[in-house]
Structure formats: C-alpha cells, structure tokens
C-alpha cells in the first residue's frame, strides 16, 4: 500500500511537472507570437509610410512638370504677342512709307503739271 501511495505521488508530481512544462511552453509561444505580431505591425507601418512618401514624391514631380509646362506655355504666348506687335508695327511703317511715296509722287506730278502749264503759257506768249 505504501508503495502504491509512493507511485501515485510520483505520478502526481510527474503530471504537475508536465503541466508546468506545458504552461511554460504556452507562455513562450505567446511571447513569440506577440513579438511576431509587433514586428508585422511595425513592418506594415513602415510600408505604409514608404508608400505615402513615394506618393508625395510622385505628386511633387507631377506638380513640378506642370509648372514647367505652364512656364513654357506662358513664354510661348508672350513671344507670340511680341511677334504680333512687331508685325503690326512693321505693317504700319510699310503703310506710312507707301503713303509717303504716293504723296511724294502726287506732289511731283502736280509740280510737273504746273511746270508744263507755265511752259505752255510762255510758248503762247512767244507766239
């Protein structure tokens, strides 16, 4: 009977030790799972941050390209306006020149006509 009790106690101790070992193992697994979970969350945060910064950089690049394109368009428009003004000015000058030439020709014609009339009068007087 004593032997039986001893065996039973030994069995009980063994069972308790086994339980303790299982508890320790479970705690270890929990700790590892927690660590893994934290690591995963940190990685997710880092990825999210990286994606956000990439998106920001891409947007900045697009903005820069748009600004450059706008500046180029403005420059072109300014140049076109300047060219148009220069063309109108040139046309005005040409018109003035033509008018001046025409006026000069008209004056010359009138003077020639006067001279001719004077010559005719003188010729009539001589007769």
Image: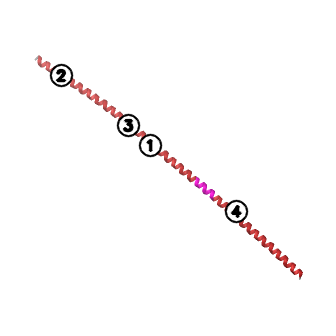
- Residue at x 83% of width, y 74% of height: 115
Residue 44 vs 19, above or below: the answer is: below
Would you name the residue on which mark 2 appears?
A: 12
User: Circle 3 — which element?
Assistant: helix
Q: Residue at x 52, y 49 (%)?
A: 66
The residue lying furthest to the left in this view is 1
In the displayed structure image, the side of residue 108 where residue 65 appears, left or right = left
Distance CA(mark 4)–CA(mark 3): 74 Å
Looking at this rendering, what residue extends furthest in the bottom direction? 127
Nearest to N terminus: mark 2 or mark 1: 2
Element marked by disc 1: helix
The crowd level at tag 1 (other Cα within 10 Å; few <14, some 14-19, many 20+) is few
Q: Residue 78, image x and y in percent? A: 61, 54
The mark closer to the camera, 4 or 3, is 4
Q: Secondary structure at mark 4?
A: helix
The residue at which mark 4 appears reads as 93
Task: Provide residue 122's location: percent of width, then percent of height.
Answer: 87, 78
Question: Residue at label 1?
Answer: 54
Verify CB contact (< 8 Å) between mark 1 and mark 4. Answer: no
Compare marks 1 and 4 and give the one earlier in the sequence.
1
Marks 4/2 in contact by CB < 8 Å: the verdict is no
29 part of magenta stretch:
no
Disc 2 versus disc 1: nearer the observer? 1
First-in-chain label (4 vs 3): 3
């Amino acid at each position: 009977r004593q032997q039986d009790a001893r065996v039973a106690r030994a069995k009980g101790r063994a069972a308790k030790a086994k339980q303790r070992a299982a508890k320790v193992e479970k705690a270890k697994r929990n700790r590892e799972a927690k660590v893994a979970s934290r690591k995963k969350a940190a990685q997710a945060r880092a990825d999210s941050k990286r994606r956000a910064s990439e998106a920001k950089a891409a947007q900045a690049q697009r903005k820069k390209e748009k600004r450059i394109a706008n500046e180029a368009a403005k420059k072109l428009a300014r140049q076109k306006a300047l060219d148009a003004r220069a063309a109108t000015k040139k046309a005005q000058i040409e018109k003035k020149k033509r008018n001046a030439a025409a006026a000069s020709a008209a004056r010359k014609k009138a003077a020639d006509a006067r001279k001719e009339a004077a010559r005719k009068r003188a010729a009539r007087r001589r007769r």
